[in-house]
Image: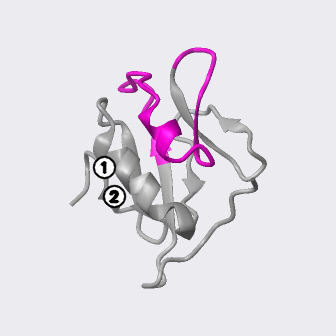
Amino acid sequence: MRVQQEVRADGETLEVWIDQDLCTGDGICAQYAPEVFELDIDGLAYVKGSDDELLQDRGATTPVPLPLLNDVVDSAKECPGDCIHVRRVSDRVEIYGPDAE
């Protein structure tokens, strides 16, 4: 499935990234939103790009598709490593995750 950048109802585009330094490798994120997250051979979770490839650069982000927003948010809430960050693209303010305001 190709992940497309989507805009939320309030007009904001969101992106998600994972802090691999805190990732515990539980795979909860990949269970909730396999179109967005995947575990790599190193046992850590990464976000996927629009071409379904893992984005392994530190701090790599991917757009949150509107149909998967709830799954991505649930992933951030349930992550035992508290390593999933969802933020607005416009001002880079985290709205879900450990640094959410």
Mark 2 element type: strand
Q: Is residue 34 shown in magenta?
A: yes
Position of residue 51 measured from the top left corner of the image (x, y, whole percent): 78, 48
- The tag on residue 94 is 2
Q: Dot 1: few (<14), some (14–19), or many (≥20) neighbours within 10 Å?
A: many
Give the residue furthest to the right.
Answer: 51
Q: Is residue 89 above or below residue 99?
A: below
Position of residue 30 measured from the top left corner of the image (x, y, whole percent): 52, 37
Q: Mark 1 vs mark 2: give the one in front.
A: 1
How many numbered marks have been drawn onto this rendered protein structure?
2
Position of residue 80 measured from the top left corner of the image (x, y, whole percent): 29, 31
- The tag on residue 97 is 1
At horizontal 47% and vertical 29% (from top left) the residue drawn is 27
Amino acid identity at mark 2: Glu
Give the residue furthest to the top.
Answer: 42
Q: Is residue 51 shown in magenta?
A: no
Amino acid identity at mark 1: Gly
Instruction: From the viewer's side, name the closer residue of 59 and 28.
Output: 28
Principal SS element in the magenta part?
loop
Q: Quadrant of the C terminus?
A: bottom left
Q: Is residue 66 above or below residue 29?
A: below
At horizontal 56% and vertical 34% (from top left) the residue drawn is 46
Give the residue furthest to the front.
Answer: 31
Magenta part of the protein: which range?
A: 17-43
Q: Are marks 1 and 2 in contact (CB under 8 Å)?
A: yes
Instruction: From the viewer's side, name the closer residue of 61 and 44.
Output: 44
Q: How far separated are the C-alphas under marks 1 and 2?
A: 7 Å
Mark 1 element type: loop
Position of residue 76 measured from the top left corner of the image (x, y, whole percent): 35, 46
Q: Dot 2: few (<14), some (14–19), or many (≥20) neighbours within 10 Å?
A: some
At horizontal 75% and vertical 56% (from top left) the residue drawn is 2
